[in-house]
Structure formats: structure tokens, C-alpha cells
Image: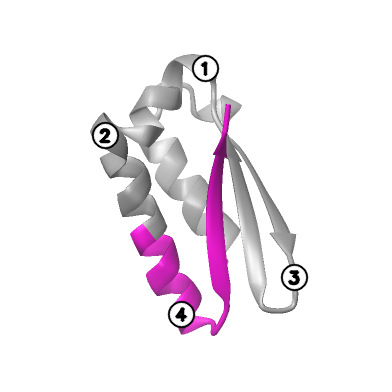
Amino acid sequence: MLKDLVEYIAKSLVDNPDAVQVKEIEGEQTSVIELRVAKEDLGKVIGKQGRTARAIRTILSAASTKVKKRAVLEIIE
């Protein structure tokens, strides 16, 4: 569910949605979600001063609280 949420948000932001890759590494308490986008779309996902990335992390945090898990978003170049 969290992986799909991040994928949906990322595909909505970028110019090349086919290049978006989301991988979820699940632990007992924490999920690490790795987001890869095309190099030219990296700025769109991060945003000015990291505002967009922070907003995505906030949404992810709220959604992960609902499923009683902790989620961490890593944006990989």
C-alpha cells in the first residue's frame, strides 16, 4: 500500500513516469521505500530546498501510522 502511494505521487510529479521505480524493503517494524526517477526528473521530486520530498515524506508518515508501521523514504539518484 505504501509503495503504491509513493509510486502514484512520483508518477504524478515527473515528466517521464515510465522511469519511476519504487522498491520496498520490509522489516518487522520499519519499511524502507526506495524511489528512483530519471536524472532529469530528480529536481521535480526533491523540489526547492527539499520541500516536495518533505511533503512526500509527511504523507508517507501519515499513511504508515494508519497501518501501524514506520516508513522511510529514500530518493536514490
First in sequence: mark 3 vs mark 1:
3
First in sequence: mark 3 vs mark 2:
3
- Location of residue 3 in the rendering, given as x and y in whole percent from the top left corner: 59, 57
Asked whether residue 68 is drawn in magenta, I would say yes
Q: Residue at x 48, y 22 (%)?
A: 16
Q: Residue at x 64, y 71 (%)?
A: 30
Measured Cα–Cα span from mark 4 to mark 2: 26 Å
First in sequence: mark 4 vs mark 1:
1
- Location of residue 53 in the rendering, given as x and y in whole percent from the top left corner: 37, 44
Q: Amino acid at mark 4?
A: Thr
| Magenta-highlighted residues | 58-77
Q: Quadrant of residue 1?
A: bottom right
The residue tagged 1 is: 39
The residue tagged 4 is: 65
Q: Residue at x 40, y 28 (%)?
A: 14
Contact? badges 3 and 2 (CB < 8 Å): no
The residue tagged 2 is: 49
Bin the neighbour count of mark 2 within 10 Å (Cα to Cα): few under 14, some 14-19, many 20 and up.
few
Q: Amino acid at mark 2?
A: Gln
